[in-house]
Image (tube, rainbow, N blue to C red):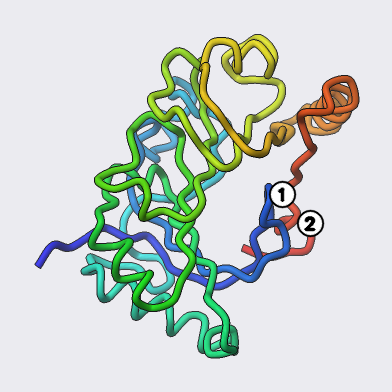
Amino acid sequence: MKKYSVKEIFYTLQGEGFWTGTPSIFVRFSGCNYWSGREEDKAASLCPFCDTDFVGTDGENGGKLSAGEIAIKAIRAGKREGYIGKGMPGHCVLTGGEPTLQLTSEIYGALHQSRFRVAVETNGSNHISPLPRQVDWVTLSPKVPGEKVTLRRCNELKLLYPLPFGGEPEDFLSEWKGGADHFYLSPIEDENWEGNTQATIDYCMRNPRWRLSLQTHKVVGLP
């Protein structure tokens, strides 16, 4: 039986993008192809601004888990808070690190059988395999220029602003030549956060295709 490395599984509100405010089960997979997760490697990585701990399997409900065990722990995380069992499907977000390094149709199937809507958050460096149609929602959040993003279709495109790889969001779209239903910009949270936020607001107001997305879960103190 195949086992997957899962950092944590927890219940919270989605804090960003289209599903902001939606009660959600997050399954955070271990590992990423853009950063080792070690602080000594961070400055030279593609994501020196990353604020996520995706190393190991020692988080809440984490471990080396089968697809069935992932689904069971996702259900239990929701039931504990009274979320699951209300006669409606749960919203399950597969994230990381970079979840596509591990995702399989077995995981999608187990979650769908448990009546979850399956969403994937990815940097776009890998195809969503093996069956993209098994994923109900795709959030693409690339950290490299558009020409290097493998994924060519998503439900929502979410870029950090200012773009860490330079240029402007419209430049990225020209290079990427992909498609999205919704477009979001998130200000980078660093020592220039206030300036980044104002710059993001200004860009969205000049380019109404884009919407401002803030990390509202942090604002209200959620994980």
Quadrant housing the C terminus: bottom right
Gap between marks 1 and 2, in whole Å? Answer: 7 Å
- Looking at the image, the residue that sits furthest to the front is 133
Percent of width and height locating residue 103? 29, 51
Image quadrant in which you'd find residue 158 = top right
Q: Residue at x 51, y 23 (%)?
A: 178
Q: Are marks 1 and 2 in contact (CB under 8 Å)?
A: yes
* Residue 215, numbered label: 1
Q: Which amino acid does label 1 sit on?
A: Gln
Image quadrant in which you'd find residue 168 = top right
Percent of width and height locating residue 122? 45, 40
Quadrant housing the N terminus: bottom left
Is 212 situated left or right of 173 in this image?
A: right
Is 68 situated left or right of 162 in this image?
A: left
Name above or below for residue 11 compared with residue 103: below
| Secondary structure of the residue carrying numbered label 2 | helix
| Secondary structure of the residue carrying numbered label 1 | loop
The total number of labels drawn is: 2
Percent of width and height locating residue 38? 38, 38
Q: Residue at x 37, y 60 (%)?
A: 7
Q: What residue type is labelled 2?
A: Val
Label 2, residues with CA under 10 Å away: few <14, some 14-19, many ≥20: few
Q: Which residue is drawn at 26% across and 49% down?
A: 102
Which sits in the foreground, 89 or 9?
89
Q: Which residue is drawn at 27% across and 76% down?
A: 69
Residue under numbered circle 2: 219
Label 1, residues with CA under 10 Å away: few <14, some 14-19, many ≥20: some
Is 12 situated left or right of 111 in this image?
A: right
Which sits in the foreground, 74 or 178?
178
